[in-house]
Image (cartoon, coloured by chain):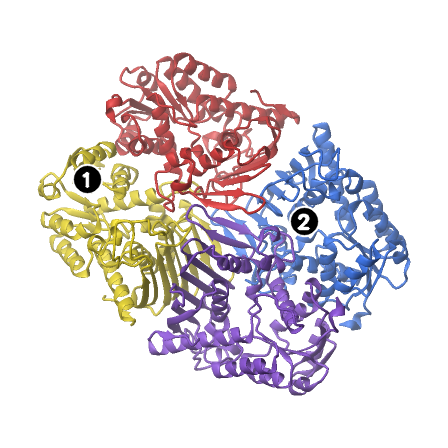
Chain colours: A yellow, B purple, C blue, D red
Amino acid sequence: MTSKGSPMRVAMIGYGFMGAAHSQGWRVAPRFFDLPAFPELSLIVGRNGEAVAAAGEKWGWNESATDWRSAIERDDIDIIDIVTPGDSHAEIAIAALEAGKHVICEKPLATDSADAERLVARADERGLVGTVPFVYRYHPMVREARARVARGELGALLSLSGAYLQDWLLSDADDDWRVDSASGGPSRAFADIGSHLCDLIEFVSGDRIVRLAAVTRTVYRERAEHRDIATEDIAGVVVQTAAGAIGTLLVSQLAPGRKNRLTFELSGSDASVAFDQENPELLWLGRRDGSGLLLRDPAALAPDAARISTLPAGHPMGYQDAFNAFVADSYALVRGEHPEGVPLFADGLRAVRLTEAVLASAASGAWIEVAA
Amino acid sequence: MTSKGSPMRVAMIGYGFMGAAHSQGWRVAPRFFDLPAFPELSLIVGRNGEAVAAAGEKWGWNESATDWRSAIERDDIDIIDIVTPGDSHAEIAIAALEAGKHVICEKPLATDSADAERLVARADERGLVGTVPFVYRYHPMVREARARVARGELGALLSLSGAYLQDWLLSDADDDWRVDSASGGPSRAFADIGSHLCDLIEFVSGDRIVRLAAVTRTVYRERAEHRDIATEDIAGVVVQTAAGAIGTLLVSQLAPGRKNRLTFELSGSDASVAFDQENPELLWLGRRDGSGLLLRDPAALAPDAARISTLPAGHPMGYQDAFNAFVADSYALVRGEHPEGVPLFADGLRAVRLTEAVLASAASGAWIEVAA
Amino acid sequence: MTSKGSPMRVAMIGYGFMGAAHSQGWRVAPRFFDLPAFPELSLIVGRNGEAVAAAGEKWGWNESATDWRSAIERDDIDIIDIVTPGDSHAEIAIAALEAGKHVICEKPLATDSADAERLVARADERGLVGTVPFVYRYHPMVREARARVARGELGALLSLSGAYLQDWLLSDADDDWRVDSASGGPSRAFADIGSHLCDLIEFVSGDRIVRLAAVTRTVYRERAEHRDIATEDIAGVVVQTAAGAIGTLLVSQLAPGRKNRLTFELSGSDASVAFDQENPELLWLGRRDGSGLLLRDPAALAPDAARISTLPAGHPMGYQDAFNAFVADSYALVRGEHPEGVPLFADGLRAVRLTEAVLASAASGAWIEVAA
Amino acid sequence: MTSKGSPMRVAMIGYGFMGAAHSQGWRVAPRFFDLPAFPELSLIVGRNGEAVAAAGEKWGWNESATDWRSAIERDDIDIIDIVTPGDSHAEIAIAALEAGKHVICEKPLATDSADAERLVARADERGLVGTVPFVYRYHPMVREARARVARGELGALLSLSGAYLQDWLLSDADDDWRVDSASGGPSRAFADIGSHLCDLIEFVSGDRIVRLAAVTRTVYRERAEHRDIATEDIAGVVVQTAAGAIGTLLVSQLAPGRKNRLTFELSGSDASVAFDQENPELLWLGRRDGSGLLLRDPAALAPDAARISTLPAGHPMGYQDAFNAFVADSYALVRGEHPEGVPLFADGLRAVRLTEAVLASAASGAWIEVAA
């Protein structure tokens, strides 16, 4: 296996909640998928030297450092994995690409589309890999839904609905850096979770949202640490796709009892699919003459769904399993393999464009064409 | 019980699918609710004399007739129940009110708001009862949701989502009088089922949709018996309410595997409720610190929910039970009682106005204010 | 329709909770099924003259009376419907058969198998109809399950599990005549609800329980009105069938949160079915290579399931709908029709025998053969 | 963290399917729980030198070897993790304990209780840790259920039901070493999965099964590679507990459509809990006056459930997460910590005793007391 080359060396910039998921991904995924050589967890970088050293020791990184710029300059690093707050993504990512590194960058890829476009262009010019952890793509039943759409089982897409509901910002006592436009960008709920929802819907359907009308709401203008909050808590959107389907999206971070409820349903002229991220082992398949509720079963799945199905049927796979598969695919891509459906910088740019369209429509009250 | 007066006499105009549900309602409901006197099933009216006589005999109507105008003129009829196709509703209802009869009229109450307004005004002037079978109001768990909202459990309404999905018109081989604007009015999917969805959301929330932006789609311009079809198969809507909540509605009659999937979720600042008409014995109650899935249990329900809960917990109530309760309440109203939450002509008018707003927005691409 | 003969006249003995369900059944079902002539609700009988008169007026019975014996003697009565407490069933039923009446008798048909056998024999000799309201047979999805078994879809039956859980007797403050052996017979939980469970499993599977080992428990020896209670609150049973399948049954009236949770799952060599009475519109169909969750849809059901499916897909049918269908079928049988799957006195006897086997095994600690 | 001591060195004997789960556990868990020092993946042992070397390289073990006896003798190994077929467990485990190693041993701990007793005694005498991967204990909602029972929320346990259904041996073309008594021991379905079910029920309830009556069935006496198969495919059991509760257990490896369906429901005098391993993020909590369906939410869980809840609410945890937590706890125990609820050799012995009681009852047709 290692005959295909020596391990590549990873540096992770940032070490918050997502840092644990990424570290576990790096640590595990390459070894439980069929990968060419293993990555090395070389360096973890954060501003607080003591804290980042502790995180690094805990999660198994070889070294720690406090200056991301010099980390990027090091010759013995091949891949930069960015898990910092949103406003720093573009700057770090651009610098990493300039330094010739492959990049994995948490979403939002950038807080405006100009930056995101530059990132896509730079990665292309340099022939470097840039991926974005739209990890919900890595639930096997999402892949199964996509495979069924791709082989025509749904017929023409007619309508769609999606929702992404959470409640962690329900009260004005709840706070986070994301509520502040200065650190998180002009959009919050849509940029943070609506982006996942759109990515999933477009990924599965193979269709594109081309026009939309949106309304947003900021329920709390003040929270514990923030004043004059302008980012939205909730967004409602009605959309049209390239194929002519119409549908609705609802995104909220103030929906009591919903923790991470990402659901979508696609209705075609022949069949429908519906998925709920909180119960990801199931896929509803709707047909006029009898519907199915499929439990993930590697033996019965499409190849791309079976490929990332590392546990037998009835042994639930969850969020970390999806994350691991994303890291494995990112690494495979860096190694020159071409796994299906890896979320790339272009997908991160797409999310920024959709977010901008939502904000523009909410501000103007008009339908907005989404830039292609 | 009959001491409160003599039975009132009902004539039903029309005898299609809904005729069976209405007949069973008249036959049963008054006897299984606590009602003042029982209605008499006096007369059933339809154009085909033989067919209407057979239906009347089967369903237990005393007489049958073929001319609705003379039926309305009869002195021995107190209540007219209209179950004909949509384009005749307003004409028959107006005539019935003019003749001093109470009226139950299937939706749409009228195919435009001017007619619907006239009906509301005429019933008011004459002091006559006019009700519209928005029967989904009569699921006990819908009443339970409403009671919880009314007593403040949800806090301020922040967002909502609703969908009403069917598949009986999925293929272009499927046809119905409703697809034709001439007989069903300018809107189809929204007038037919979207109206139920909006009624339910406004009924439960106590809030009102004040602005909306919509998109509609007519997938098949030709069906078995119809050409140049202009009525919509699907509608997607984004809404704002008087209280400032925002949300989305999706309505489709071409959603494979969904038979009569009317669902809604209301998220407040303190709690959420969600309901699914296809599983009406349950109500999801969402709270940040633990959610419940309540099974209908008369002993634990709000009074207005227990009132229409004619079976003990665990003995499923369904569509016909809801229908029966609607008929019982309509009759109680005619008898001078004041049961809670009966859907009136004003609610039928409301549905027409919302439908007109949807069509206007879909045509213009602009947000539309919904007439109060 | 009435050409097939004149209506038959029904007398109902008893007027408790089940009386309402029976009355609604008599009132409605014959008119919403395709029946030869309609029944007449002639007479309702109860010990308290005033109360029975009120019930009769409310539910629509023509007359009321207080003496069941003279009611049975009347020439103008064709059918006796018995809804009294359990210890009087056999006596009334035998008398009714002697008087040449058809009989519908609530379960338990009798409190011992000798009485039940006599009832079966007497009905046979006289050529009279005797039915027992095992009404859960009348959920369309139960019929669908049965039809699939009958046409071999499940293959050979290998295992089964069933449970019937309620909580209405959870506390020792809860009481009922059934807890008293003197009025309800020696078994309570099993006779009352275990009998339904076994009937359903044998009805759907077409197989028979031939041996069983049981354990029972009486949690409360004293309740509000009763002392020295000997009837069981809970029963656990392990069974073998004629076809060699093995399985388990659990019955409890002290299961917090379960109201009327009758569930069963049958696993065959090729496929499985599972049903939950509290959600009766669904049937789970398990296959190794992909399982289905079927929503009742008349267009896709087996003929015997479609036959009793009086509402379109997505319009939930419930307990009363099942009850109505049972009454319609009982009446059809009396009229000389031969509808499929009507629960007969022989089925009531079967339930008594299974109940006796459970008690015998619980008492002796041994496996018991169930009398054929 | 490492201040608490140097890493301990692990050797894993065997490298089949469970080897991947164990390896991932060793690789990850210690780093994502709060553990004293990290384990070292020192040695992997298997009979086929080339294959075990490949597995070792893939999963990240430092060395590989082919002779388990010499592996056990090595001074630089502290922990032996046994994932070989069942008939070799006891021999290897005894040898490992003799050599002074801590042991993690896949179930069945032994194929008879005499061996299992010796293992428990030897670990005790030597003061060594012995754990058995009853990993379903490590779903947070199982811990939550247990904590609720422990703090008295359920009241006295009255009844229980459990099932463990799979379909991977459905056809006689399906085969496995477990079907052969010589390699897997006299029991198969019950030893393999019934043991998990009983462990979970006893773990959550804190109660003990003291008597049982069982029936077993071997559907296929011949499979692809085996003749005269005597191990059971299916077992049905009725049980009594020390606290007097009664209940049923069904175990089958021939249940079409059920992949790994481990479910249980415990009913107490005050409340009930129900759990389904295929949807492990939910716990049903039944109360007479309203039931809940709790989604795992670390913020709302009992401490022992929150402790192993490594992902926020709404981010599904699955089988591997449970496995990782088991490995982390086993390691913590070896390091001298005392985490709650670790499945020990005594629990493995318990499973063997219950299995023996099931076989004895099935053979004799009598109720059997389970050895304490």
Circles 2 and 1 in contact, beta carbons < 8 Å: no
Asked if marks 2 and 1 fall on the same chain, the answer is no
* Callout 2: chain: C
Q: Is residue B214 left or right of residue A111?
A: right
Question: Alpha-carbon distance for marks 2 and 1?
Answer: 63 Å
Above or below: residue B180 compared with residue A88: below
Q: Is residue C187 left or right of residue C304?
A: right
Q: Amino acid at mark 2?
A: Phe
Above or below: residue D22 compared with residue D165: above
Q: Amino acid at mark 1?
A: Lys
- State the residue in front, A167 or D267: A167
Question: Which structural element holds mark 2?
Answer: helix
Q: Quadrant of residue B65?
A: bottom right
Q: Quadrant of residue A239?
A: bottom left
Residue A288 at least partly seen: no
**Mark 2 sits on what residue?**
C203
**Mark 1 sits on what residue?**
A4
Above or below: residue A336 compared with residue B154: above
Q: Residue B327 location in percent, x, y?
A: 63, 69
- Tag 2: Cα neighbours inside 10 Å, few (<14), some, or many (≥20)? some
Question: Which structural element holds mark 1?
Answer: helix
**The N terminus of chain B is located in which quarter?**
bottom right
Q: Quadrant of residue D239?
A: top right
* Callout 1: chain: A
Residue shown at 44% from the left, 80% from the top: B229
